[in-house]
Amino acid sequence: MTKILDKKHLGIFISICLLTFTPVRSWTKGDVLVIKGGEIHTVSGEVIPEGIIVLKDGKIQSMGQNVAIPKDAEVVDANGLIVTPGIIDARSSFGVSPPREKRRYIVPERKIIDFFTPIEDSPWLKCGVTATYITPSPYDLIGGFGAVVKLAGNKDEALVHDEAGMSVSFGESTIKGLDMPTTRQGRIGRLRQEFIQAQEYQRLRKEKKGKELDEAEATKYESIAKALNRKVPVRCFVNNPDDIMTALRLAEEFDLKLVIDSGSAAYRIAHLLSEARVPVVVGPSIMGLGGGGPFEMFAHTPENAGSLHKAGVKVALSTDSRGGRSILSEGVVAKSHGLPEDAALKAVTLHAAEILGVAERMGSIEPGKDADIVLWKNHPLNTWGEAQKVIVNGKIVFDRKK
């Protein structure tokens, strides 16, 4: 005979059902959604108590305390809740399937978006993460273009920027390359050689001199040229102080728009990064604390982000993973080890968007920006913070109560 669940176990069962259910809503152009009564953390400006946000056609139309509510709008009651921009993970492998072709370690023409598949019903999305930078492999000396994607919608809807960074790596992670130099000096020499050849390619093309290159070679140099012309930032995956200083010298030599990725020991030369005005996407503290990853990751400390911020370095946070804990876990750790709460929130919203080159669309709550918004019970950087509703492009994509 089947045993009837007691009240305790019935409650647990119902809770599991609620957590695993994601509503589907059909929207059409012109739908208006209004968020009313919440404490709005704009990130770029002042906190607005009991505010109103009007969302239309996937954008933030207006906001404030005295805002007219359109008659045909769907109104979301946010009383007692905190309202923030969607959370951004500044470096991950979300939805990325590694290329199956024979590994080549210099592939500047490759676009990671070609290997991206959206993940439906993502646990990260239910945690309030609405966008992420997806990165090429750190095993490649030049890995190609990273991309910014949203965590909702099909591939076309998810794509924000398909050339958000040029991936470069010459630390411990690249040492496995069988056809690559085995020393750091050799790898830097090879990287410099590729940059110089791309410069020469541009010069000869401008002067209409030199031999015609095959399509593959021309595409390679044209891709590198986007970094040399500062159209695309160079995302340099390095950890120890020597490698970070090498990256700074390369940036000065070739006039690169440099971003340091991971930067386990970046805090040791924070003053140099601040002077050079080079931002850091800090790698995961949680992995470092657990002893995972390359040996050079052991230099990492949970005070890294706080120390860099104190020195005047712009900081974003990353999980550098395709699943597991969301980026908010990194925010909580950083806040608990010296990164002020407002800076920690910016590190996963506005500063992340600025480093990724998409701040005109996301990272703060401002009219004209994408309507990517999260309603929270408790502050998102509180261990009890919990996303109640997640909105992407003006559509409710997760509602915990339903």
Image: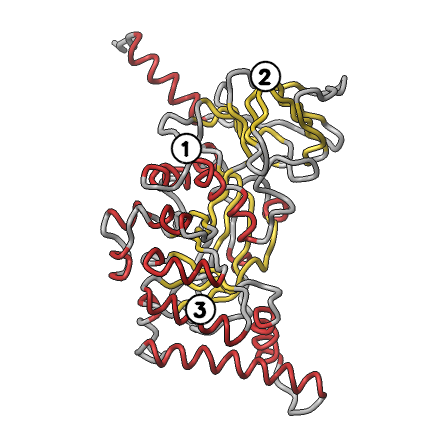
Q: CA distance from mark 3 to mark 1?
A: 32 Å
- Label 1 sits on a secondary structure element that is loop
Q: Please name the residue that numbered disc 1 is placed on.
A: 381
Q: Is residue 290 left or right of residue 396?
A: left
Q: Is residue 3 left or right of residue 261?
A: left
In this view, the mark in front (3 or 1): 3
Residue neighbourhood size for the residue with mark 1, other residues' Cα within 10 Å, grouped as few (<14), some (14–19), many (≥20): many
Query: Looking at the picture, how far across and down is residue 317, in whole percent?
Result: 42, 47
Q: CA distance from mark 2 to mark 3?
A: 49 Å
Can residue 397 be seen in this snapshot?
Answer: no
Residue in the image at 29% along x and 11% along y: 8
The residue lying toward the viewer, choosing from 142 and 341, is 341
Which amino acid lies under the numbered mark 1 shown in the image of this protein?
Leu
In this view, the mark in front (2 or 1): 1
Can residue 293 be seen in this snapshot?
Answer: yes
Q: Which mark is residue 248?
A: 3
Q: Which of pointers 2 and 3 lies earlier in the amino acid sequence?
A: 2
**Residue 184 drawn above or below residue 270:** below
Residue neighbourhood size for the residue with mark 2, other residues' Cα within 10 Å, grouped as few (<14), some (14–19), many (≥20): some
Q: Please name the residue that numbered disc 2 is placed on.
A: 77
Do tag 2 and tag 3 residues touch (Cβ < 8 Å)?
A: no
The residue lying toward the viewer, choosing from 52 and 140, is 52
Query: Looking at the picture, how far across and down is residue 195, in whole percent?
Result: 52, 78
Q: Which of pointers 3 and 1 lies earlier in the amino acid sequence?
A: 3
